[in-house]
Image: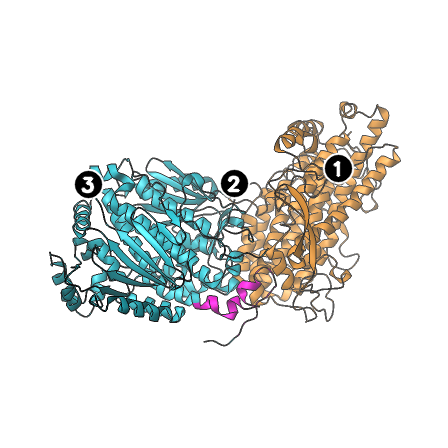
């Protein structure tokens, strides 16, 4: 039986027979998936100090307790409704928002929700082996917090599928548990979610850059004319912020440690490494990789799907209210394109450039984070700086894929690319080195791995040496 | 940059060495045709062929590949049609190409793609060359219609790949490349399920796709390649094609062009732009001809019937696509009737040999191409002509035929065994049967006529339309041509398409007569191509605006 106590919610689950019936079928499969594909080695004997959302008001979503991972109370929450909300963009601008899925957009909406939903469990799967390499209990706890919330985000998308898409929605909800990251037969939908993340540098970069793409997507979906989708994603954004906090501060702490090691030595990469730290070049290579890959997740520069999502009011721009024109029927976007070996500006109808508009917003958001990182380098009196590579660098999707650009955005030959890619992107030796410094997990309270500095403060005002993850007898 | 098709001539000849969109590979009795469409490789540059979507340039290569497998690789017994793109089989015809094409081009594009899919089925039914669609990614619209033309369809079971016909809900048009017809007529999908499926953008995947007969089997990604090979091998085993070659290489066609005159080795096309007519002349065989299969093989693509019908086919395609304003094609022949009849006898007596079989079916397909060409065909049977046997089919295919009745210049036509069934129309009937639908017994009598048929007999039996004498001939022909070219081209196309195909319905006639006709009507309607029509707004300007009145 579905218990509304075990499933905190603000969607009136106790009286919603249809949702109850759907969840009765789905929840056991979800738990089975979590046990099989969730954090490896931390299912049965560990209690984790986790935040559980119990309501959407300010203290309700910050309730902390020790919980065994499979017993986490995954809930269903929508942000509070905005009375008399109207459609904020597209052809139906100004009309009342929808409280049911309009039949004509059923398929497009379903595809958006399924694609978003698919990434949530995928990242849990990708990260499942990180627990055995953690740099501290504090970080281990953060990993699990991210994981359970990605799980809750899956619940959020499944709630929409179950409530608004009938039988097809139930089938899709089930498929979300059948596809798995990297599975040869049933892989996750987006390619970036099919490779394991097996070191903590990648994990922090992923939460910084790829979860920020999640933020981009959630921002644009939170503008949707489908009110339940807008409200669901708005609440998800509050949790997503924590994931990016984990990523950004994770890299900050690595940088801080690197700076300390550079100060102690002559500041050469080899010296940092000899002392077990992660040198700046290696950090930059990983930044390059995850940033360009996350740019890909925003889709093609010129996209008929994006145009149609905007026109139909399904997916808007991040912070749509900050724009003046919400219909943009005649506007154009001045886009950089590459054809016949040269770069030039080309006008594209604005609606078709929506992916690029969102990507630019994303780049700005990332840039602010990178600037904060550089502050640390500055504080340590170092002249080195991290930077975001050009949007054209190392792209696998869109108009620049199949061509070669250096991180500054200059076109290079294939030979040049092959010769220098090891300077620009992570190489096998990086992977092996990172593996070597993460062999031993650190489970002792208050102790941090040599390559990372402690955080400024603990979770929920707890001390740094608090036992965030405890083992049961 | 605005571009259209009017300033650009479409070339139909190609070769595997020059393919841009397909890869053709061979492994013993199995061939694989892999789709890998180059985004920038389309006929025009104002659209990109994303996700293995196709335009005419992609289909021209497909048609060429099928034709070459039949002639150049008799040892191939089954063909796997698949994709080299990751997680994409084929997204169907390119929407932006369709949206920006003029009506006549769209219609000719659809016609050619339909003929190519029918050529796949013809290869299976008539030549024992079996096709397996190995759907290894998303498969939408024309992509699924291509699969429907194959003998078997297998789908990868990856939780994502689906087959779909989203034309109606997404684009406001029909799956017009045989899709609707093959669902219910060929795969025998229940009509309510087909109706549901055809209004569903996302299509059907997994077990449901098998239960509802949209595909024959599902395989996991890890087992897919192996299962496809096994099924292709099983299909190959059911073939009656020879176990080894050599085949016949189809060399490039030689053509000399001077102004509006095209000179092939056996076919001449002469365009009269002022009159909007073209004379198409086929020359009969010359000199000694093979009488056995070995000699036939040795001559290869130079063997007269193969050469002449390849040239005729090329001429018809050129006229269709590149000469839209030429409304009447005057069919003529030149040569020795007896020589044509001898060729027919040789082909008929060797019809169990793979090459003779392929040549006969190719002649059949070319004549069908003529039946389906939206131009008026008028046959002029004059002295020195050789409307005999297989070439008599040209006169029988024509909308009207004129035979000169001049005692000083005797003119005759003749029957061969090939008029009795080897070259059927898309209805399944021969042109003689169609012509004499009201007098079925007459067909046998006519086929039994051994000797040449003089004008008065031809007129009396109804084998020709009119037999003006030498005094009237020039005026009669001139008046007829001038009168006809002044009529509405649309009315003529509709009239001819209705009169040519008397008799029973088949999958083919339904595709060309019902599906295409409705599609061509929809293609003209504001709901599809108006300013806010579905085909125009797709992907650019949001939702279409419809005129809600049902007609």
Going by the image, does B159 lie left or right of B332?
A: right
- Write down the colour of chain A: orange
Magenta span of residues? B521-547
Nearer-the-camera pick, B407 or B169: B407
Q: CA distance from mark 3 to mark 2?
A: 56 Å
Q: Which residue is mark 2?
A: A184
Q: CA distance from mark 1 to mark 3?
A: 89 Å
As drawn, the label of residue A343 is none
Foreground label between 1 and 2 = 2
Determine if residue A471 is in view: no
**Residue B219, how many percent across, how many down?**
43, 45
Foreground label between 3 and 2 = 3
Subunit bearing disc 1 = A
Q: Dot 3 lies on which element?
A: loop
Q: In which quarter of the view is residue A305 placed?
A: bottom right
Q: In which quarter of the view is residue B174 placed?
A: bottom left
**Residue B205, how many percent across, how many down?**
47, 53
Instruction: Note whether B494 is above or below B283 in the view shown.
Output: below
**Mark 1 vs mark 2: which is more N-terminal?**
1
- In the rendered structure, does residue B534 fall within the stretch colored magenta? yes
Q: Which residue is mark 3?
A: B290
Marks 1 and 2 in Cβ contact (< 8 Å): no
Subunit bearing disc 2 = A
Q: Which residue is mark 1?
A: A137
Subunit bearing disc 3 = B
Give the residue displayed 80% in from the left and 24% down from the top.
A268
- In the rendered structure, does residue A7 fall within the stretch colored magenta? no
- Write down the colour of chain B: cyan
């Amino acid at each position: 039986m579905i218990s509304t106590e075990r499933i905190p919610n603000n969607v009136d689950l106790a009286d919603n027979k249809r949702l109850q019936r759907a969840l009765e079928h789905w929840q056991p499969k979800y738990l089975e998936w979590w046990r099989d594909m969730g954090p490896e080695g931390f299912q049965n004997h560990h209690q984790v100090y986790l935040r559980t959302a119990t309501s959407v008001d300010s203290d309700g979503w910050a309730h902390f307790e020790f919980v065994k991972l499979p017993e986490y109370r995954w809930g269903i929450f929508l942000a509070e409704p905005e009375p008399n909300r109207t459609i904020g963009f597209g052809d139906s601008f100004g009309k009342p928002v929808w409280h049911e899925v309009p039949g004509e957009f059923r398929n497009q909406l379903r595809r958006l929700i399924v694609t978003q939903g698919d990434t949530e469990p995928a990242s849990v799967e990708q990260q499942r082996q990180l627990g055995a390499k953690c740099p501290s209990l504090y970080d281990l706890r953060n990993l699990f917090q991210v994981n359970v919330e990605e799980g809750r985000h899956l619940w959020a998308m499944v709630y929409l599928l179950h409530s608004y898409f009938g039988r097809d929605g139930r089938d899709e909800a089930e498929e979300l548990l059948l596809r798995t990251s990297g599975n040869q037969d049933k892989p996750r939908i987006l390619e970036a979610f099919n490779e394991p993340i097996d070191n903590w540098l990648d994990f922090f970069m992923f939460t910084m850059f790829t979860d920020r793409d999640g933020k981009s997507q959630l921002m644009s979906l939170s503008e949707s004319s489908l009110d339940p989708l807008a409200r669901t994603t708005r609440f998800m954004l509050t949790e997503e912020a924590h994931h990016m906090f984990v990523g950004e501060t994770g890299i900050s702490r690595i940088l801080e440690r690197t700076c300390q090691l550079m100060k102690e030595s002559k500041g050469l990469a080899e010296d940092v490494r000899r002392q077990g730290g992660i040198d700046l070049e290696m950090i930059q290579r990983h930044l390059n990789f995850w940033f360009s890959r996350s740019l890909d997740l925003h889709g093609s520069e010129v996209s008929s799907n994006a145009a149609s999502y905007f026109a139909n009011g399904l997916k808007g721009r991040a912070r749509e209210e900050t724009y003046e024109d919400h219909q943009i029927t005649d506007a154009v976007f001045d886009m950089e394109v590459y054809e016949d070996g040269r770069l030039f500006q080309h006008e594209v109808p604005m609606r078709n450039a929506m992916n690029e508009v969102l990507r630019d917003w994303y780049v700005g958001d990332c840039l602010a984070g990178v600037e904060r990182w550089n502050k640390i380098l500055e504080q340590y009196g170092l002249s080195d700086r991290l930077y975001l590579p050009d949007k054209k660098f190392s792209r696998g999707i869109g108009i620049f894929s199949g061509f070669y650009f250096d991180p500054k955005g200059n076109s290079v030959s294939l030979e040049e690319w092959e010769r220098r890619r090891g300077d620009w992107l992570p190489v096998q030796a990086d992977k092996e080195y990172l593996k070597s410094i993460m062999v031993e997990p650190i489970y002792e309270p208050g102790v941090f791995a040599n390559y990372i500095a402690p955080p400024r403060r603990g979770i929920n005002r707890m001390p740094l040496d608090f036992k965030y993850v405890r083992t049961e007898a | 940059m605005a571009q259209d098709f009017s300033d650009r001539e479409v070339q139909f000849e190609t070769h595997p060495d020059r393919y841009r969109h397909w890869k053709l590979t061979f492994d013993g009795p199995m061939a694989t045709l892999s789709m890998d469409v180059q985004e920038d490789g389309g006929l025009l540059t104002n659209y990109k062929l994303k996700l293995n979507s196709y335009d005419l340039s992609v289909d021209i290569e497909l048609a060429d590949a099928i034709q070459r497998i039949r002639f150049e690789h008799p040892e191939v017994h089954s063909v796997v049609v698949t994709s080299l793109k990751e997680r994409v089989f084929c997204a169907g015809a390119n929407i932006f190409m369709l949206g920006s094409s003029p009506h006549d081009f769209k219609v000719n594009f659809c016609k050619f793609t339909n003929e190519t899919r029918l050529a796949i089925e013809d290869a299976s039914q008539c030549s024992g060359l079996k096709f397996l669609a190995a759907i290894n990614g998303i498969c939408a619209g024309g992509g699924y219609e291509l699969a429907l033309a194959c003998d078997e369809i297998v789908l990868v079971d990856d939780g994502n790949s689906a087959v779909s016909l989203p034309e109606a809900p997404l684009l406001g048009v029909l799956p017009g490349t045989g899709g609707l017809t093959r669902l219910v007529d060929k795969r025998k999908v229940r009509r309510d399920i087909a109706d549901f499926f055809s209004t569903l953008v996302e299509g059907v995947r997994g077990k449901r796709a098998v239960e509802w007969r949209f595909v024959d089997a599902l395989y996991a990604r890890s087992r897919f390649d192996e299962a496809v090979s096994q099924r292709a091998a099983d299909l190959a085993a059911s073939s009656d094609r020879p176990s080894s070659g050599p085949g016949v290489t189809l060399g490039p066609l030689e053509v000399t062009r001077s102004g509006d005159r095209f000179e092939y080795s056996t076919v001449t096309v002469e365009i009269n732009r002022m009159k909007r007519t073209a004379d198409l002349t086929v020359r009969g065989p010359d000199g000694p001809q093979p009488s056995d299969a070995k000699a036939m093989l040795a001559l290869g693509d130079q063997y007269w019937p193969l050469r002449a019908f390849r040239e005729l086919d090329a001429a018809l395609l050129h006229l269709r696509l590149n000469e839209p304003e030429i409304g009447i094609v005057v069919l003529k022949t030149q040569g020795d009737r007896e020589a044509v009849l001898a060729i027919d006898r040789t082909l008929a007596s060797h019809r169990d040999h793979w090459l003779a079989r392929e040549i006969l079916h190719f002649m059949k397909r070319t004549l069908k191409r003529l039946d389906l060409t939206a131009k008026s065909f008028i046959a002029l049977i004059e002295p020195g002509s050789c409307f005999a046997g297989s070439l008599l089919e040209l006169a029988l295919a024509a909308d009207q035929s004129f035979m000169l009745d001049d005692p000083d210049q005797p003119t005759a036509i003749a029957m061969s065994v090939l008029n009795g069934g080897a070259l059927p129309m898309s209805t399944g009937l021969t042109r003689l049967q169609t012509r004499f639908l009201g007098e079925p017994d007459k067909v046998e009598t006519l086929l039994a006529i051994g000797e040449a048929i003089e004008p008065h007999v031809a007129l009396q039996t109804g084998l020709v339309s009119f037999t003006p004498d030498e005094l009237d001939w020039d005026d009669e022909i001139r008046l007829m041509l001038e009168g006809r070219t002044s009529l509405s081209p649309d009315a003529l196309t509709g009239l001819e398409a209705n009169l040519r195909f008397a008799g029973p319905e088949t999958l083919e006639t339904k595709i060309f007569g019902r599906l295409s006709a409705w599609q061509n009507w929809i293609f003209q309607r504001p709901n599809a191509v108006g300013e806010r029509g579905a085909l125009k707004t797709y992907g650019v300007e949001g939702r279409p605006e419809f005129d809600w009145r049902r007609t």
